[in-house]
Amino acid sequence: MPPITNELARVKIKIMELIDFSKQHSVINQYIAEIRDCKIQGDRLRFRQNIMRIGQMMAYEISKRLSYNTISVEAPLGTAQCDVPCDPMVLCTILRAGLPFHEGFLNVFDKAENAFVSAYRKYTDQKHFNVHIEYLASPRIDDKTLIIADPMLATGSSMELAYQAMLTKGHPKKIHIASVIAAKPAIELMQKVMPEDTTIWCAAIDDALNAQSYIVPGLGDAGDLIYGEKE
């Protein structure tokens, strides 16, 4: 097989769809402004609610991409025809910061099955770490729509390992990666390691990471802002 040229590599990247909600005018931008705002971040309830709201709105947009069947519903005054989604779905989140984001998706896709992955950074020094997966609870995902929701897509390493862990449960029909704020380096990694028909959904995309691999400007440690600091 001939080597892949730069042009072919660019074509491959274009196949993976990237949705950036910050390029659109919607109330999601207000929620992003609030979760970034240092003056507001101290209100954990508001922070969690905004993360959940973003998940709900992102789920609504994803719902437009699903397959639908027409069903008949017996209403009080007759029979109504309704188009309803028919794709079997698994919602996966990365613990712990992903929980309110996951709840937003589950409020919309209330019939979905659910999966949970623990991924955490184990630092070797202040700047270097490895991502470890210690826990996975998931149904089979064969021929299902898989949504992996994680609010912060920084390096992309946790998302990559979470996806690899999910593959032990089968192979999905379609993959959606959902994040609140993503960094460009993570987007580039996803374009390399995920299947070409993956769709990436982001409420906002930031350019860079700092020396500790946190997103800049980002919003800080999402897990700590949601649940409190950890030791």
Image: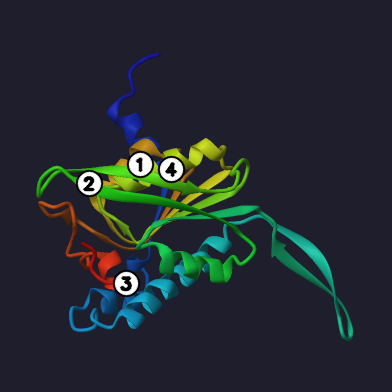
Residue at the disc numbered 2: 122
Residue at the disc numbered 1: 191
Label 4 crowd (10 A; few <14 / some 14-19 / many >=20): some
* Left or right position of 135 against 23: right
User: N-terminal of the two: label 4 or label 1?
Assistant: 4
Label 1 crowd (10 A; few <14 / some 14-19 / many >=20): many
User: N-terminal of the two: label 3 or label 1?
Assistant: 1
Element under disc 4: helix
User: N-terminal of the two: label 2 or label 1?
Assistant: 2
Residue at the disc numbered 3: 226
The answer to which of 123 and 8 lies nearer the viewer is 123
- Pick the quarter of the image with the C terminus: bottom left
Mark 2–mark 1 Cα distance, whole angstroms, equals: 25 Å
Residue at the disc numbered 4: 163
- Give the percent coordinates (x, y) of residue 141: 59, 44
* Left or right position of 130 against 143: left
Mark 2–mark 3 Cα distance, whole angstroms, equals: 20 Å
Residue 128 appearing in the image: yes
Element under disc 3: helix
- Give the percent coordinates (x, y) of residue 207: 19, 56
User: N-terminal of the two: label 2 or label 3?
Assistant: 2
Mark 3–mark 1 Cα distance, whole angstroms, equals: 29 Å
Residue that appears at 61% across and 40% down: 142
Mark 2–mark 4 Cα distance, whole angstroms, equals: 19 Å
Q: Nearer the viewer, mark 2 or mark 3?
A: 2
Quarter of the rendering containing residue 1: top left
Residue type at tag 1: Gln
Q: Nearer the viewer, mark 2 or mark 4?
A: 2
- Give the percent coordinates (x, y) of residue 89: 60, 54
The vertical placement of 165 against 106, above or below, is above
